[in-house]
Image (spheres, rainbow, N blue to C red):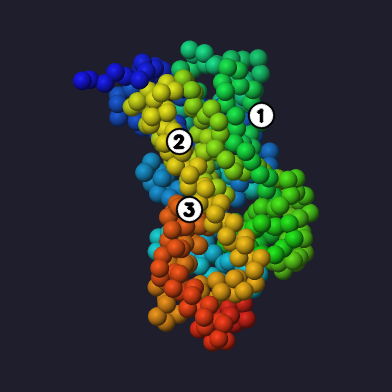
Amino acid sequence: MSRVPATNLQLKNDSRIGVVGGGPAGSFFALHVLRFAAQKKLRLHVTIFEGRDFSRAGPVGCAKCAGLLSAGAQRHLKTLNLTLPSEIIQSTADSYVLHMAGGTVEIFPPHHNRKIISVYRGRGPRLSPLSESVNFDEWLLHQAEQAGACIKFCAVTAITAGPHPAVHTGQTGYHFDLIVLACGINGRRIQFNGFDYHPPQTKMMIQDELAQLPGQNRRIHVYFGRRRGIIFGATVPKGNFTNISLLTTDDRPSLKTVDRFLAESRAGGQTQRLCGCKPHIAVSRAQGYFADHFVAIGDAAATRLYKDGIGSAARTAERAAYTAVYSGIGAANFRRRYVPLCRRIALDNFFGRLLFASWEMTNRLPWLTHLWLHALNAVGGRLHSADRCRLALWNMFTGDDSYRHIFFSLLHPGVVGLLLTVGWRLRRGQPEIKKVGETGEHIQ
């Protein structure tokens, strides 16, 4: 028996696609949909609407993001035959340094080719602007334009449903066969007419740019610990500057928290803050993120919790583009081909919450912090299990592996045995290593 198509809503020659948002999600979608259309010998007209002013430094022209490209995001660029210009790469991190309440440990990449690249999502800090050539978002948008997309620099105010849904920019309306919402949660508020779209739940973070901090040119520092009001913090090298990102317990945190954090962590002394913003991050999946002639991607739909937002944007953009070209643009098509990916991301974030909650608990209990610090730096016969622990942390910080796989890797019998052995030695007063915070030594 032959299958009956779920819908007859298909892209055809000269179909029009409107992409709301010219960040990585929107640019990746345009690149993929035009690539898939070429494979199918389909002629499409893609228009990207971008409301940011890339000529201005600071939050106005920025995506309010730390700007880290994981190994997965870098591989995604290669699948599109894109090579980052050297001027866009601000720094390449060789390691993560984990700061806990009882000491520190340095985590090195498992392979030499798994580097973390930092970029600017705009023209740099508000008080120290850089040239336009450093803007990753603008460069990627230009790649989409070269591939055939049309770019309109204007703010979208509303999206209206219908057989040919419309994008409204002030007094002007543009009709399309498919509208792709890719503007993310930090974009301008958009009115949805006829769509039952509800954005993800969010938390507010604090970000700023500082003059380069001592000893941070090739290292990303991650802070877990009993600092007042701080869940975790991170400093990322970016050329002559350092980005600082803080997730706090406050619903509406103050930028002064940066000064307090730097003082308490002894990370920056009297370093001047050069920018400052309070971006939202998605902590849930959106509702109503697909319909006939409509789909949302990136953090407007589903994104990895806390880490690798650009990688999630690339994955959802590619899957939505493939669905639109090879399956269709109806709700049934997206439900069958696109929604499973978003559900996997949401399920994976459940394990992410478990991991971050466990680390928060670890830092509340000094004995547990001490146990993990020794386990992470174990040598001798337990080196393989310690490597497994360090790999789990690397993947947790970078987004190079799923939270689910990381979670179960830490339940491996070798890891459990390592923790029991180290705990027994500590109880007997015979630790197998010196405390890293006291010696300054790091074991790779």
Expressed as whole percent of the image width and height from the top left, the position of residue 116 reads: 49, 57
Q: Is residue 97 visible?
A: yes
Q: CA distance from mark 1 to mark 2?
A: 21 Å
Q: Please give the name of the residue rendered at 49% of the width and 75% of the height, measured from the top-left corner.
A: 420
Q: Quadrant where the N terminus lies?
A: top left
Vertical placement of 301 versus 158: above or below?
below
Residue under circle 1?
A: 189
Front-most of residues 336 and 234:
336
First of labels 1, 3 by sequence position: 1
* Quadrant in the rendering for residue 82: top left
Image mark for residue 317 = 2
Front-most of residues 138 and 247:
247
Front-most of residues 46 and 355:
355
Residue 361 left/right relative to 179: right
Mark 2 is surrounded, within 10 Å at the Cα level, by few (under 14), some (14 to 19) or many (20 or more) other residues, namely many
Q: Please give the name of the residue rendered at 50% of the width and 34% of the height, measured from the top-left corner.
A: 297
Q: CA distance from mark 1 to mark 3?
A: 31 Å
Q: Please give the name of the residue rendered at 52% of the width and 83% of the height, measured from the top-left corner.
A: 425
Residue under circle 3?
A: 403
Mark 3 is surrounded, within 10 Å at the Cα level, by few (under 14), some (14 to 19) or many (20 or more) other residues, namely many
- Inspect the image, locate mark 1, and give the three-letter code of the amino acid beneath it: Arg
- Inspect the image, locate mark 2, and give the three-letter code of the amino acid beneath it: Ala
Vertical placement of 338 versus 80: above or below?
above
For mark 3, give the secondary structure.
helix
Expressed as whole percent of the image width and height from the top left, the position of residue 243 reads: 64, 55
First of labels 3, 2 by sequence position: 2
Vertical placement of 94 versus 356: above or below?
below
